[in-house]
């Protein structure tokens, strides 16, 4: 049976296209979506390489992933990479992104080992500390307090000098005069009483001088 030329060309093109087309990846649907059932089955069977390949391919080719697809992908990849010491840093990166999208998530349903659980707990602790530092409000600078006013002591009024009445001053003057006169009299009599007879006798008497005029004796 001979095929028409047109049909032969179409068949050849189809064969060449099929020969150059990449082989389908288990876990990736023809439309590029993720076949989670296939991926989860391979994971729980312990066949990690096809799971890693499907998820990495999905990350590269998917232009926009839903939140559920992102959480699913980060969760499985974080556990697969944490199982190997050489890829621990990459595992922590996926764990951090996973916790940021869903802070309450855990990995218990993936039957992880104690070592992977410790790594996940450390990353979660680091994320909580980082989150608190981002939410910490900036310190507020309090305004410079104004100096308190200096309390001034109340001005003390000088008490007025009490002046004695005019009659009192006159009385003081009279008594002062009397006291002065009395003191003078007492001093006089004291001095007079001190003169003794001896002192009186020793007082030189005036010498009587007789003046003779020339010619009176002749």
Image (cartoon, grey):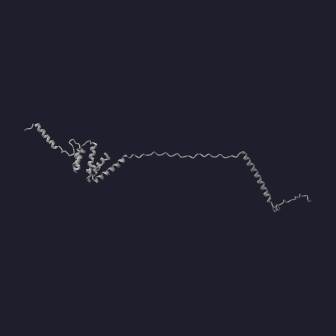
Question: Residue 19 placed where, x, y %?
Answer: 15, 44
Q: In the image, is 34 to the left or to the right of 175?
A: left
Q: Position of residue 187 (x, y in %)?
A: 77, 56
Towards the viewer: 188 or 182: 182
- Looking at this view, name the residue that lies furthest to the right: 218
4 to the left or right of 53: left
Quadrant into which the N terminus falls: top left
Q: Nearer the viewer, residue 170 or 86?
A: 86
User: Seen in the image, is 54 located left or right of residue 174?
Assistant: left
Q: Quadrant of residue 200?
A: bottom right
Total marks placed: 0
Give the residue drawn at x 11%, y 37%.
7
Q: Residue at x 14, y 40 (%)?
A: 14
Residue at x 74%, y 48% (from the top left corner): 171
- Indicate the position of residue 37 as horizontal and vertical percent values: 23, 45
189 relative to 20 in the view: left or right? right
188 shown above or below 131: below
| Picture coordinates of residue 195, whole percent (x, y) | 80, 60
Name the residue at 28% across, 43% down: 68
The quarter of the rendered structure image containing the C terminus is bottom right
Front-lying residue, 212 or 159: 159
């Amino acid at each position: 049976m001979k095929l028409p030329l047109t049909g032969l060309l179409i068949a050849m093109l189809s064969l060449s296209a099929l020969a150059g087309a990449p082989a389908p990846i288990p876990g990736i649907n023809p439309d590029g979506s993720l076949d989670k059932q296939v991926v989860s089955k391979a994971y729980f069977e312990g066949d990690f390489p096809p799971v890693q390949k499907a998820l990495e391919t999905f990350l590269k080719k998917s232009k926009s992933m839903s939140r559920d697809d992102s959480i699913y992908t980060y969760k499985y990849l974080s556990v697969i990479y944490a199982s190997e010491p050489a890829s621990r840093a990459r595992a922590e990166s996926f764990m951090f992104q996973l916790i940021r999208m869903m802070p309450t998530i855990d990995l218990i349903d993936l039957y992880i080992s104690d070592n992977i659980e410790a790594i996940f707990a450390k990353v979660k602790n680091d994320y909580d500390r980082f989150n608190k530092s981002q939410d910490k409000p900036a310190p507020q600078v309090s305004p410079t307090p104004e100096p308190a006013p200096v309390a001034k002591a109340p001005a003390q009024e000088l008490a007025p000098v009490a002046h004695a009445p005019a009659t009192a001053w006159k009385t003081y003057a009279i008594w002062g005069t009397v006291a002065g006169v009395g003191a003078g009299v007492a001093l006089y009599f004291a001095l007079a009483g001190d003169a003794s007879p001896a002192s009186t006798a020793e007082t030189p008497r005036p010498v009587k001088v007789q003046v003779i005029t020339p010619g009176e004796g002749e």
